[in-house]
Amino acid sequence: MKRRVSYTGALLISLVILANVNYAFAKTDNNQSSTIENQVNPFSNSWRLVKHRFQLHIPKNDKPLSQVIIETPSTVAVSSDIEVIDTTGQKVDINISTNGKQIIIDFPDKVIHNTKLLVNLNRVRQPTSGTDSVYRLSAKVVGSDAEIPMGVATFKTF
């Protein structure tokens, strides 16, 4: 239990809210701000193709990540066009699988620690009105099968 609490505290990300303008700021556990982009392309009258981006902060003194689990809202359809980019701008080697509305990003190299990762969900089909899209994020670390809650990312409809 003690281990899970320390991992939970170390891997927290805060709420990400995208306003109708194309930029928003995400508060992190160390009170630094990051710019989050949302790029929108019209798809039809009631749906749009958008890009949902969020940043994960992986602390220094924690075990490396083995997986990131994204629980997608029922109001969106996420394509398999997903990329993860590290702080140097390089794409991270990932394997993607799905389980219903859950996207599992597996890191085969198992060296994801002490970094920030930018997760791009490209070509997300989102309604133009209705409730906000809320993604629930969790992770697994190397050597553990326990899912550690990381927070939520919220994207407004417009």
Image (cartoon, rainbow, N blue to C red):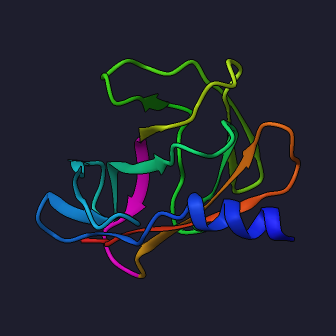
Q: Is residue 75 left or right of residue 5?
A: left
Quadrant position of residue 133:
bottom left
Is 12 situated above or below 109?
below
Compare residues 138 and 21 and report the one nearer the observer.
138
Residue visible at 51% across and 43% down in the picture: 60
Q: Note whether 87 is above or below 25 in the view shown.
A: above
Outermost residue, bottom direction?
Answer: 131
Q: Relative to the observer, which residue lies in front, 46 or 19?
A: 19
Query: In which quadrant of the rendered view does residue 155 lie?
Result: bottom left
Q: Residue lying farthest left? A: 21
| Magenta portion: prevailing SS class | strand
Q: Residue at x 45, y 49 (%)?
A: 56
Q: State the quadrant of the N terminus.
A: bottom right
Q: Position of residue 68 (x, y in %)?
A: 64, 45
User: Residue 86: percent from the left, percent from the top?
Assistant: 40, 29
- Give the vertical position of 148 relative to 103 (above or below): below
Residue sitting at the far front? 61
Q: Is residue 31 magenta?
A: no
Q: Nearer the viewer, residue 65 or 18?
A: 65
Residue 109 lies, in percent from the top left, at: 67, 18
Is residue 121 magenta-colored? yes
Name the quadrant containing residue 122. Answer: top left
Q: Is residue 87 left or right of residue 6?
A: left
Q: Is residue 5 left or right of residue 133?
A: right
Asked whether, in this view, residue 115 is left or right of residue 80, the answer is: left
Image mark count: 0
Residue drawn at x 60%, y 68% is 9
Name above or below for residue 38 compared with residue 148: above
| Stretch in magenta | 119-130
The C terminus lies in which quarter of the figure?
bottom left
Place of residue 102 in the rendered image (x, y in percent of width and height, measured from the top left): 71, 53
